[in-house]
Amino acid sequence: MEKTSKLTEEQLNQIPKDVLVTMYLQLSDTMKQVAEQNNQLLRQVTSLEEKINILTQRYFGRKTEKASEIDDLQLTFDFYEKHALNEAEHILDSANAEEIEPDPSQSVRKRTKRKGKRQSDLQYLETVIDEHTIPEEMLNEYFPRGYDVLPHNTYYTVEFVPAKFVEHEHHVFKYAGKHGEGIRVADAPEKLLPNSILTPSLAAGIFCCKYVNALPLSRQAEDFERVDMNISRQTLANWMIRISDRYLQLVYRRMHQKMLESRLIHCDETPFKLIAPDRAPNSKAYMWVYHTTEAYGSHPIFLYEYQDGRSSDIPREFLKNYKGVLVTDGYQVYHKLAGERPDELRVAGCWAHCKRRFDDVLKALKTKNPKGAISAEAHKRIAAIYHVDNMCKASTPEERLDNRQRSVKPLVDEFFSWLKSIDLTLLDKSGSLYSAINYALNQEPYLRAFLDDPIIPLDNNDAERSIRKFCVGKHSWHIIGSRRGARASAILYSIAETSKANGLKPYEYFKYLLEQMLAHLDDKPADYIDDLLPWSEKIPEYCRLKTFE
């Protein structure tokens, strides 16, 4: 029988009615399934497009979190409330005003150089006076009947003196009495490390290059070779590890004890690659950072800690004796830790993390898209919260708390009430906007924490700025070659950042620190450590930045 792709009208008329009904129902079910699959694929494509746009913006777009291309924010959903936040609209208009391109037809006044700027820039440098004169015999030749010295011209230049290596060959003399009085050996400087050429000045130079200026040890070794100093990268790494183990961990432990006296600590963490025999090639290690400042009853302290993972055991051990506030992102580990000690620990959330999620959607989709319009509204509301709170940033704690209760709390209440009024069933659960809204709602108790405590900041940006120093470095050196190296890096980054935060010159302070610890290493107890901490008043003046405020 010949097969046909289409039944004729006569053939259809011969098919029993109940068979036709069955065929129709089956076809209808199939079409529904196909339509549902198409809708699902369309949602996936839309979600992927959003993520691609967000990633493109994140890696190649502007890094500012200001909304620069926001329209009149006409939302298509019924839950839009025009009266909710005039303050935010004012802030948003101001943000736009800052980014308006100048009219080429208008003349632009050239910025004039500030008078006295050069003298101000050079005021703390060592000054060498060079006098440029004409020899007396030539002056007598030019002016045979005598001359007068007029006011001289003065100008300034700055000379750069590059680093250099100087080998010291130490000859330690020995003396013996002729009549059996014994042997005497002349005093000589102690070695920083046994059987090593390392000195405090050389260690400080290596330290500053890597842990302050993010120059990998491999490049330092290459630079040393160009000035006839041959030291391998492995030797440089070994030196940093050994001085951390022998000297610097004592300073680190004392800074840790001092940090736990603070009322508030910022926390964050970032992954990096670590090579170790028992680790998988693509597994991640983590560098944790803890930060506190004078505003929380402590000297500025940055502490980095290397760990193999991100479990709750890590901050639990580091903060086991701490009672106060932790300002963090939304990572659940911190919340679990606070839940174990509710009377001692409190977690405050980060409004910057919350705002950033909406900003990513806004930058990728713009306000003409309904999702972008919702994100723009969220941006405005959070910006208003920041603005009103910052109005009392320099006020007393009592005034700031009063402002938060009277003016900021209503804005926070309106923000979460508005979020809860959004029908999330209209949004794709895999989409970025759904994720942003869900994050904000889940973090509500922690985002509200700042309202009843004037010392709690709105965000965790301090910790993010702290961890950024390590991130800049890891993009240069890519990997750490051992656990000992990772632990040493944590200690060295801690000393580098804490010394800078306390207004010290990292090179001078690090050199002074090693010199003093070498002289007092055998002291028991090690009370001298307090005099060497970066905020100690006993740190010499030459270690301090004169421009530090």
Image (cartoon, rainbow, N blue to C red):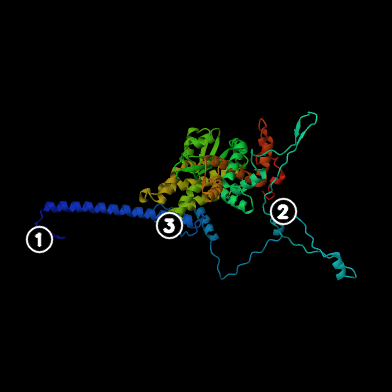
Q: Please, which residue is most extreme toward the top here?
A: 180
- Is any part of residue 210 visible from this angle? yes
Question: Looking at the picture, which amino acid does disc 1 mark?
Answer: Glu
Q: Tell me the residue that label 1 is attached to.
A: 10
- Nearest the viewer among 404 and 216 is 216
Q: Give the number of the mark in front: 1 or 2.
A: 2
Residue 422, given in percent of the width and then of the height, sits at 40, 49
SS at mark 2? loop
Q: Tell me the residue that label 3 is attached to.
A: 365
Q: Where 165 sits versus 60, above or below? A: above
Question: Looking at the picture, which amino acid does disc 3 mark?
Answer: Leu
Residue 418, given in percent of the width and then of the height, sits at 44, 48
Q: Earlier in the sequence, mark 3 or mark 1?
A: 1
Question: Looking at the picture, which amino acid does disc 2 mark?
Answer: Leu
SS at mark 1? helix
Disc 3 versus disc 2: distance between alpha carbons?
52 Å
- Nearest the viewer among 165 and 131 is 165
Q: Tell me the residue that label 2 is attached to.
A: 125
- Nearest the viewer among 26 and 247 is 247
